[in-house]
Structure formats: C-alpha cells, structure tokens
Amino acid sequence: MSVSVFDMQSLQHLWSTDELRAIFSEENRIQKWLDFEAALAEAQAELGIIPAEAAREIRAQAQAGNIDIAQMSAEIRRIKHSLVPALKQLQARCGEDHGEWLHYGATTQDVVDTGVALQLKEVHAVILRDMAAVGQELARLAQAHRDTPMAGRTHGVQALPITFGHKCAVWLDELSRHHERLKECEPRVLVGMVVGAVGSQASLGEQAEEVERRTLAKLGLAAPSISWAPARDRFTEYALLLAMLGATLSKIGNELFNMQRNEFAEVEEAFSAGKLGSSTMPHKRNPTSAENLAGLCRPLRAGAALMLEGMVQEGERDGIAWKIEWKALPECCLIAGAMLFQAKNLLAGLRVDGEAMALNLDRMRGYLLSEHVMLELSERVGKQTAHEWIYEASMHGITNKLDFAQALRQHKDLASLLGEDEIQRLTDPAGYLGQCAASVDRVVQTQRAAWLGA
C-alpha cells in the first residue's frame, strides 16, 4: 500500500523521477551497506587483519538480492536494530568461518552514513547532469530572445524595458553559481567513515587510519580527518544547496506562471494533445508545469530545515537527531531532481510571444520611458529640474488619459526643449534597452565555456 506522494503511481511523477527513486530504493540502500562491508573486508585482508578467503567470500555474497527484505524488516521490528538483521543474513550466506570476519571493528553508523554518501554520489551525478540540461535551455532562450523587448517589472508593476533574453540570462547566471557551489562541496560531502563506536577507532587497531583510507578509496569516497558521526554538517550542506537550487527553479516557475496569465499572455508552456485544464471549463489551458515547479520548493525548503535540526547532536552519537536524516535527505534529493527534470521540459517547450510582450510594453503608453527622457534632459537643465518637469507632465498626462508623448508636448517647458523627432526617439522602448544584448552575450559565452559546453 502506497501512502507517500513519492510512491503513489498517480502522483510520483510530480514529486520525483524513476532514476532518483531507484537510487533511494530500499534495495539500493541495502546494496550500499553491503558495498561498504565488502570494501572494509578487502581493505582488512590486504593489511593481514582478516583472512583473504573471508574477504573474497564476503565480496561474492554482498549482493542485495541475497537479502530477504521482508525477513530483515520483521527482524528489525523484533530486535529494534536497523542494520544487524541484514548483517546476519549476509553472515549466513558467507558460511560460519568466513562470516565471522564480517563487519570487523566497524559500527552501524559507519555503514549507514557511508552508504548515504554513496547514494549522494549517485544523486550528485544526476543533479549536475540535469543542471547542465536546464542551463542549456536557458542559454538557448537567452540567445534567441536577446533582442525581444518586454516590460521589466519591479514591485509587480512595469518599470523599464528589458529583453526576455536578459531575464533568461539572469536566471542562467544564478544557476551557474549553484553549479559552482555543488562542485565545491564535493570534497566535504562525498566522504565516508570507518571510526567505530564512539569515533576513536579503538576497535580497528593500530592500522585504523589505513583501514579507513583503503576502504573508502575502494568506494570512491574521501577519508575524513576525524569522526563526523556527531557532526552532521556534511549532509546538511548538501540539502541546503539543493534548497537554494530549488528556490531558483521555483522563482523561474513562478515567473513563467505569472507571465502566462491571460492578462499578460507573454509565454505559454507546451500544450500536448489531450491535456485537460478543468473538469468543468473545457476551454482552460492551465500552466500546470510552471505551477508545479513553483510549488515544489516549499517542501524542499522544509526538508532542508529538518536537516538543520539534525545537526543538534548529543554526545558522540544521537539517534534522535540522526534518524531525521533518513526522511529529510532523500526527500530533498528526490524533489530537487524532479524540479530539474520539470524545469528542463518546461523551458524546452516554452513558446515566447514577442508580439504580446510588445503590446504589454505599450500598455503604459510610453510612461516607462520617463527615466530615459529625464537623463537626456539632465545635461541641459539639471537632473532635479528634469525630474520635476517630467513628473508634472506625467501626472497631468495620466490624469487626463494622455500618452507620454502627448504629455511631453503639453508641458510648456518640455515642449520648448524637445522637438517631435526627439520625443518619438525618447519614447521608443527599443531605444532604451541599455546593455541587455551585451550582457546576454557575455553571460552565455562565459557559462558555455565554464560548464555548459558548446
């Protein structure tokens, strides 16, 4: 029986992807535990701590398919321990002599935390890959619409002209910083641990440091300087970085959601045959992809907050805080992965309506060019005087339903300074786009060279 949105067949596509659900499946979780045990045994055998035959047998039997999950789960409920039942089954598969050397000197948290690090290693590759796919779509849109004028809005209302390509380049630039952060965190996050019960490595003998180094090298993870069993900043950092990434993707989704309002109609997400907007209003084409992308970050941020709670540990091990991660971290990864997947599809199918953007840009009848006129006149009459005159003209024009050019013509001081050709030039939005095109070119070129490729 499925009770989670990540598992329900009717909902899971909105909250996760098949690929990430497989990474966080129970089978893969167990396999990561067994990978740890096999690597530990091999490292110890190389150092003469356990028999080589035992290590070979442990490696051969360390397959999740050899674990009866139902039996393991029943035993977990009986003995109240999350790992030992799986180890018992693996020990039995290895035979009495070889199985005795299983899990030699390690503790449960070594296995579980290193297992999570191995899962994060797989997740990390997917996240970086899909970030690049989203970045490619943003770069494409930025270039395609570097010169497509639209209204730039501040505080929810029109401010000055920009281009849609500029908006996409701003998003791309922000996404690139998340990529940098995720790459920079690798040596801190992709780290395992073989430290024993309280982190002292007493159970691992004089070769403890080398056992840990070899074990983790076999798993493709870095070795820590000291136990991090009670120091949960590694996994928390990753969750927080995913939350930041999610916030950016949510912002993009929310912006595209608003731009699809009928009153704006500046963009439209891909429409597929059979897509239904309402059970009662047959005409509707809802922005479902954008709104789902905008909404997913809320539970992602909540999960990241839970990871912060898990950092408050007691002593050298604290199950109260530690077990929070078992819920919060996989969910953060699943949601972030879903957001990247959905963002890529949304951007790839986005239809941009340049005519609607131009129409909206003209809704204020030129008044959003007031800064342009003011700065042009500042050299002649001074900035403060220019501001005062244009303010007077604007208030008069808006009150009397005049367009901006008409308002300029009716202001005696402005009319004496500005000829008709100059008024037309200064009130043309296409003439006040500043460095939009140059900024787009610079950002796209920089990011393609840095991490997106050609």
Image (spheres, rainbow, N blue to C red):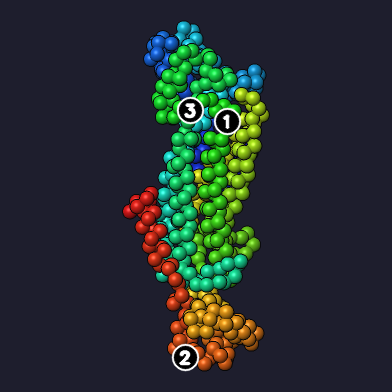
The residue indicated by pointer 3 is: 224
**Image spot of residue 139 (x, y percent):** 40, 58
Q: Residue at x 61, y 60 (%)?
A: 278
Which amino acid does the dot numbered 2 rest on? Gly
How packed mark 3 is, by other alpha carbons closer than 10 Å (few <14, some 14-19, many 20 or more), is some
State the image quarter where residue 322 is shown. Answer: top right
Percent from the top left, x then y, of residue 270?
A: 48, 60
**Label 1 to label 3: alpha-carbon separation:** 12 Å
State the residue position of label 1: 231
Point 44% across, 77% down: residue: 431
Identify the residue position indicated by label 2 in the image. 419
Q: Residue 336, can we see it?
A: yes
**Tag 1 near tag 3, CB within 8 Å:** no
In the image, residue 19 sits, relative to residue 393, either above or below, namely: above
Compared across the picture, whether 233 is left or right of 419 comes to right
Q: Is residue 385 above or below residue 163?
A: below
In-image side of 55 versus 202 (left or right) = left
Identity, as a three-letter code, of the amino acid under mark 3: Pro
* Mark 3 or 2, nearer chain start: 3
